[in-house]
Image (spheres, rainbow, N blue to C red):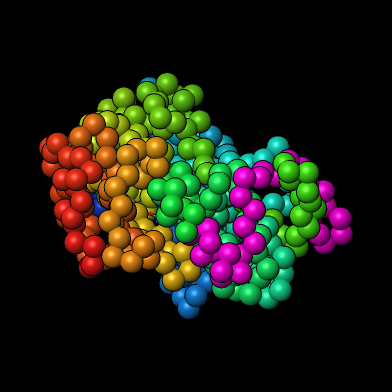
């Protein structure tokens, strides 16, 4: 079947939905179509590892996609992109001729070379599977000590599961937080009842009846009723690569208007590599705020606006009763300056590089995101002494 639309969006995720709403707002009469590989319509992903395990209802996650009055084709994957013909082909053989195209394809979880039945946590369908397994008392192994692994481990413990986390780093969040903070978070998880096995990886697995036996790198084994993994994602760039678009940092390179190396194709969300002038580099960001803001702006620019993207990456996380917001780059390899009101419970961490502030972690400190953005944009130079106290640690 042949379709013809003004605007075609590949990916019915957070960026794709934001783009569709923006296009509709700017161009009430335009034809817009969205192809989404998942069976579910667009939804908020962050609650899958947070609010849905507390008191939020599943209905709360759905995006109001009907307001975009777009043709929404779910369970449909775009399989080929012919740039010269302006045609995308999907996995049912339908051909979609577009005027302008947005690639908002997000990422696919990294997997292990073994692990039948592991839940690689990314989608609402993954959430439903894990929820099914997460009966009180169930033994659940969580592989990965980054954002997803640590949030899922907290959620499962909250649900009454016997949770074991394992990861190769020395502590939870070791790649993002300064070492002492990461160690403190790890102790905190242990206090909350999570068995934390730091410094080990899973090397194999065997299913026996309803159980999975994991083999670990320290020679031990771990038996679990379910295994969930958060090992990061691989951006879905196959279409872009096959079509010859410019790629970098694992994503599709866009300019400050979120336009790719093809003038009729934009990219947004986890899959886009965009310039961040305040940080003096290109970034590819895997966070909600970037997905929504790049999606919205790409949609507006596709609809005829010409606005440059100037947001700095912002994100947040909840770890049991601890919570934080962060702006910029959180990389524990940078110089970190810690400013605590209460050590590891409330404070600010600054990430410095070359005399500039590159990132700010607001640990149980609220209302400082805009001030953190301004600090990162400031020319400096800053060092440990001059940056300390720049942001109030109490929000
Ligand atoms: C459990 C979880 C918790 C998170 N928590 C936070 C948080 O607390 N804070 C935060 O800032 N960020 C969080 N994130 C990250 C955030 O959700 C992502 O950055 C955001 O969803 C990215 O949006 P996106 O639209 O780029 O990609 P996605 O939301 O992944 O959407 C992409 C969609 O495109 C589809 N697709 C891919 N290829 C094709 C194709 N060829 N044809 C058709 N469809 C295709 C995919 O199936 C997917 O549905 C979390 C992520 C997860 C998984």
* The one of 174 and 254 positioned closer to us in this rendering: 174
The answer to whether residue 210 is magenta is yes
Above/below status of 61 relative to 390? below
Residue sitting at x 34%, y 29%: 253
Is 134 on the left or on the right of 360, as rendered?
right
Residue 100 position within the rendered picture, expressed as x and y whole percent measured from the top left: 31, 36
Residue 154 position within the rendered picture, expressed as x and y whole percent measured from the top left: 54, 65
Residue sitting at x 53%, y 34%: 79
Q: Is residue 335 visible?
A: yes
Q: Which residues are magenta?
A: 185-212
| Residue situated furthest right in the rendering | 209
The answer to whether residue 357 is magenta is no
Q: Is residue 33 visible?
A: no
Residue sitting at x 29%, y 47%: 337
| Residue situated furthest front in the rendering | 385
Is 138 on the left or on the right of 208, as rendered?
left
Q: How many marks?
A: 0
């Amino acid at each position: 079947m042949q379709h013809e639309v003004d605007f075609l969006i590949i990916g019915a995720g957070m960026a794709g939905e934001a783009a569709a709403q923006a296009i509709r707002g700017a161009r009430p009469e335009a034809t817009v179509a969205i192809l989404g590989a998942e069976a579910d319509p667009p939804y908020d992903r962050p609650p899958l590892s947070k609010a849905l395990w507390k008191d939020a209802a599943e209905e709360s996650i759905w995006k109001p996609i009907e307001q975009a009055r777009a043709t929404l084709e779910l369970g449909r994957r775009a399989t080929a992109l012919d740039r010269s013909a302006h045609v995308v082909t999907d996995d049912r053989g339908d051909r979609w001729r577009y005027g302008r195209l947005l690639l908002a394809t997000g990422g696919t979880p990294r997997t292990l070379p073994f692990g039948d039945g592991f839940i690689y946590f990314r989608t609402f369908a993954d959430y439903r599977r894990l929820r099914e397994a997460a009966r009180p008392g169930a033994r659940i192994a969580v592989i990965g000590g980054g954002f997803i692994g640590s949030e899922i481990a907290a959620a499962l413990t909250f649900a009454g599961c016997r949770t074991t986390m394992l990861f190769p780093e020395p502590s939870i969040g070791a790649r993002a937080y300064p070492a002492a903070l990461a160690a403190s978070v790890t102790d905190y998880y242990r206090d909350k009842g999570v068995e934390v096995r730091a410094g080990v990886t899973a090397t194999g697995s065997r299913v026996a009846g309803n159980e999975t036996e994991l083999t670990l790198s320290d020679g031990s084994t771990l038996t679990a009723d379910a295994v969930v993994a958060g090992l990061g994602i691989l951006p879905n760039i196959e279409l872009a690569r096959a079509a010859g678009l410019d790629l970098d940092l694992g994503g599709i390179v866009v300019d400050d208007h979120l336009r790719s190396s093809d003038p009729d194709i934009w990219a947004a969300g986890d899959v886009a590599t965009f310039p961040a002038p305040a940080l003096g580099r290109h970034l590819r960001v895997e966070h909600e705020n970037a997905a929504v803001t790049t999606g919205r702006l790409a949609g507006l620019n596709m609809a005829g606006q010409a606005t440059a993207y100037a947001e700095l990456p912002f994100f947040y996380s909840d770890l049991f009763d601890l919570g934080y917001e962060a702006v910029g780059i959180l990389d524990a390899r940078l110089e970190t300056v810690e400013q605590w009101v209460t050590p590891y419970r409330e404070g600010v961490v600054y990430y410095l590089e070359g005399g500039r502030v590159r990132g700010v972690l607001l640990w149980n400190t609220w209302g400082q995101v805009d001030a953190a953005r301004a600090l990162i944009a400031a020319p400096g130079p800053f060092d440990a002494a001059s940056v300390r106290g720049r942001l109030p640690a109490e929000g």
